[in-house]
Image (cartoon, rainbow, N blue to C red):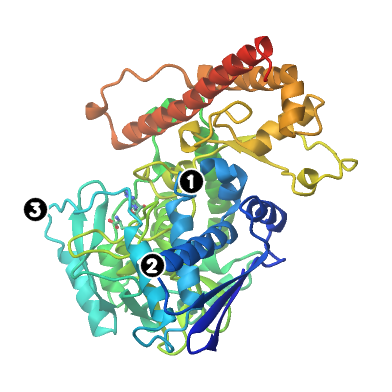
Amino acid sequence: MVGAFNTMSETTVELCLELSEDDPFYQHKKKLLSSKGLGVKETVSLSGPLSQQLLNAALEKLLQFGRIVNLDKVEVYFGDDACTPAGVYSVRNEISALTWIFSLIPASSCKPQTLEAALREALEVRIGEVVGAEEKEARVDDSYRCEKESRLVEWGQRNGVKTKLQIAQIDGYGRGAIATEDLKFGDVALEIPISSIISEEYVYNSDMQPILEKIDGMTAETMMLLWTMREKHNLESKFKPYFDSLQESFCTGLSFGVDAIMVLDGTLLLDEIMQSKEVLRERYDELIPLLSNHKNVFPPEMYTWEHYLWACELYYSNSMQIKFPDGKLKTCLIPVAGFLNHSICPHIVKYGKVDLETSSLKFPLSRPCNKGEQCYLSYGNYSSSHLLTFYGFLPKGDNPYDIIPLDVDVIDDDDDEDMESVSSWTTHMLRGTWLSSNHNIFHYGLPTPLLNYLRRAHGLVHHSETDLWENLEVEMGVLENLKSTFDDMMQNLGDADSMDRENVEWDVEMAMEFKERQRKIVSSILDSCSAGIKMVQEAIGKPPV
Ligand SMILES: C[S@@+](CC[C@H](N)C(=O)[O-])C[C@H]1O[C@@H](n2cnc3c(N)ncnc32)[C@H](O)[C@@H]1O
């Protein structure tokens, strides 16, 4: 996406927005823009003095454009049917759209009473209105003293870390970061100098480097993992307060026991966890014998399977991908920032790039966070199964990335030259149909790309409203087909567990919660199919006027 702000005269400014042709979803987004009466290039002119009404209208147009160009793959797939009546696709998208438009208005020209200032202020108000799914006040466990955490923060501050966050033990989150003052949009909650970040440089400067560089296929990530496994025992380590602050065990899906795995029977998460663990075990079995000739550098007692799994879980759940001034993307461990928890409605979204001027990593707010509230990061647009496997938690609220992928054969529709085939999808997915706002006939709360794919598979190539009304038997076939697939899936999931959740291990409880959420999604899809079948049956008996 491209945008430019032009000052035409003292009283006229314009914002030019463009959907970039390089966007991987260009055709889909072009179609969505067109359905709103927008083109791939739009200019919004503003002339002063500006009434509130004109300002709102301009903002609405900018926001409509900004939302669509900022949609990610899942959001494009579910499209307009997933919008709220106010036109919001998701909290993530709303924040991205608002902050993108805000970033286009130069702050330097922002004298009070100008059009720019009015626009920036209006955008800030809208950003402040984006609400999270989490509780406002963090429930802090005061019995936990946070000694190791305070020592780490003090160490950080001596080494140039600047923070407006306090570390605390928060019910349901482990440690977390709480705002010590009211933080506005744009405020930097945390700033970490590069010198306090753990990156691959430390391995390159260690005695491990000459050994590891001779091993075929050795990656920077594996090198860091091996370095970390030894460095955490080093009493002289520069990062000792960081290693001291880490948990002794990580409760991610990779540490699930047999009982929890059994609970996951019938879910795709079972395969995800088993496969991930298998891959780790294979890597470990290949790697460790190669180090056995260098026992002085790699002491065997530090390189057991248990220690290796701990380090993998540390990197999965605590590392971040950071872009360095040399342009390289590096996996890093970041002291203090590692206390930030994830949310579907995060405060901090943009944080992955070292600031050249200050040689530090900044964590600026993309929406306000008041004093006493937990400040959340976005770890990425992950499904709950990914978050459970690699981070060990299920996010609060509806996760729009909780999709069920459908294995389908791609239909070769080269002959079909309409717009739909140009933008057709090669993978399909479903999610909880309560996330859709369109449950009418031909929609049913189900994703349109999937319905159109199934209609094509049933021989119906064109999908105009008239085509659909004239081929109701196809519609019926599509819905019955889908229902039968999900009936099977529900059967595999089985009935709700009768175990008392209070008295089970952490992993079993999490597995039960995950399965319950899966049942809810599948059940909503089944309900939508049944309601759809009823609508189509009625329509067959009663053709439209
Ligand atoms: C980067 S650390 C964040 C700090 C962590 N809470 C701690 O005590 O060290 C990531 C881990 O925090 C926890 N976490 C992050 N976001 C969470 C959330 N929304 N709900 C519950 N736990 C969360 C998970 O255990 C995850 O593996």
Q: Which mark is residue 143?
A: 3
Say whether disc 3 or disc 2 marks the residue closer to the N-terminus: 2
Farthest-out residue, top? 541
Could you tell me which secondary element the residue under label 2 belongs to? helix
Q: Please name the residue that numbered disc 2 is placed on.
A: 52
Instruction: Name the residue type under label 3.
Output: Ser
**Disc 3 vs disc 2: which is toward the camera?**
2
Residue at (30% x, 66% y) in the render: 243
**Residue in the foreground of this view, choosing between 54 and 262:** 54
Label 1 packing within 10 angstroms: few (<14), some (14-19), many (20+): some
How far across and down, in percent of the image, does residue 86 sit? Answer: 44, 49
Residue at (42% x, 84% y) in the render: 107
Asked which quadrant contains residue 253, the reply is: top left
Measure how far apart labels 1 and 2 are at the Cα level.
44 Å
Q: Are marks 3 and 2 in contact (CB under 8 Å)?
A: no
Measure how far apart labels 3 and 1 are at the Cα level.
32 Å
How far across and down, in percent of the image, does residue 168 sit? Answer: 18, 60
Q: Is mark 1 within 8 Å of ligand 1?
A: no
Instruction: Name the residue type under label 2.
Output: Gln
Could you tell me which secondary element the residue under label 1 belongs to? helix
